Amino acid sequence: MMENFQMRTDLALEARESISEADSELRGVRVEEYYHEEEDIRVTKVMIDTKNAAKAMGKPMGIYVTMEAPAMVEPDEDYHREISCRLAEEILELLPGADSEQSVLVVGLGNREVTADALGPQVVDNLFITRHIVREYGTAAYNCSKMNQISALEPGVMAKTGMETAEIVKGVVEETRPDVLIVIDALAARSTKRLNRTIQITNTGIQPGSGVGNHRNALTLESLGVPVIAIGIPTVVDAATIVGDALEKMLEEDKDLENVKYKEKQRLQFAELNNMYMTGKDIDAVIKRVSFTVSEGINIAVGETFMTE
């Protein structure tokens, strides 16, 4: 019934769920699920192996790991530490050469002035930056034999810089020559239940501005010449999605054929809502909390890897 009502999502998990029952066994797509009961974290790994599957899913080929933590919006520091530790494990699984010393550039995408889009910049604020210290004093500065060189970049948005994010990042990559990029950005979700409660990690890179449909040049291995790990949290949901969900529920419950026809006709009048995005009323506190959680996960994965040996 919702064929003509396009729903917006950046999560591969939701794209997989939206595939019709007839295509539930889509070739080229593998799904693995894990539930960590102690932390109440559900991890779903979607692996897109073929070009046909990538076309059907609307996502590039690669691995997409989705962590669902229902209590992530709660101000529980111990629980957020558990999420960070689990996130670090997932990052290390996707990170090429995780066992060896390397240079890692972390890029925080988004607009600091727009709260729902400030995830990337706020993650950068809390990172454990080591590149300048290691280059000046060596790994002995951290009392270890090996240490990753962590650097960070907050490229801002085109409206402020007049430059594509990809142009800025590419220039920095060519100058500093990192071994891998970790890119953080806010995403859009299909379900309000996943807002600020879900973390997606993928090795396929990212398109800046994708969360609000403002597609810019992609940050990928092909465009930059280095592996790109993308981390995102859905902070907004398409207004058309909310309206569509409400109308769908009404259509299912209403038995009057004339009412159903009328609501079905009205449902198609909400195309303009595709340009409106909704977020929670406490988004400022939530962004501050989850950005620290993500930064801690990155710090554990690449900043403390060799310090704990």
Image: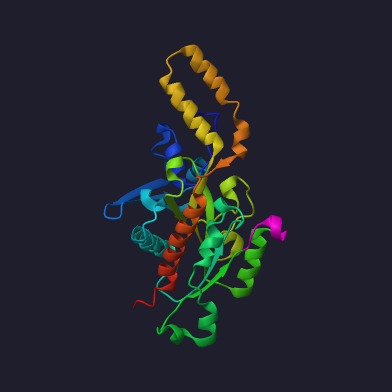
Relative to residue 168, is residue 25 depicted above or below?
Answer: above
Relative to residue 182, is residue 242 depicted above or below?
Answer: above
Task: Kindly tell me whether residue 193 is visible in this rendering.
Answer: yes
Q: Give percent across and percent down for residue 283.
A: 50, 50
Q: Quadrant of the rendered structure where residue 165 is?
A: bottom right
Seen at 60% across and 53% down, the residue is 114
Number of marks present in the image shown: 0
Q: Quadrant of the rendered structure where residue 20 is?
A: top left
| Magenta residues, start to end | 155-163
Does residue 162 appear left or right of residue 204 in this picture? right
Residues 287 and 133: in front is: 287
Residues 223 and 229: in front is: 229
* 161 falls in the magenta region: yes
Task: Kindly tell me whether residue 182 is visible in this rendering.
Answer: no
Q: Give percent across and percent down for residue 157.
A: 65, 57
Q: Quadrant of the C terminus?
A: bottom left
* 156 falls in the magenta region: yes
Q: Give percent across and percent down for residue 259.
A: 50, 15
Q: Quadrant of the rendered structure where residue 5 is?
A: top right
Q: Give percent across and percent down for residue 249.
A: 44, 26
Colour mode of the rendering:
rainbow
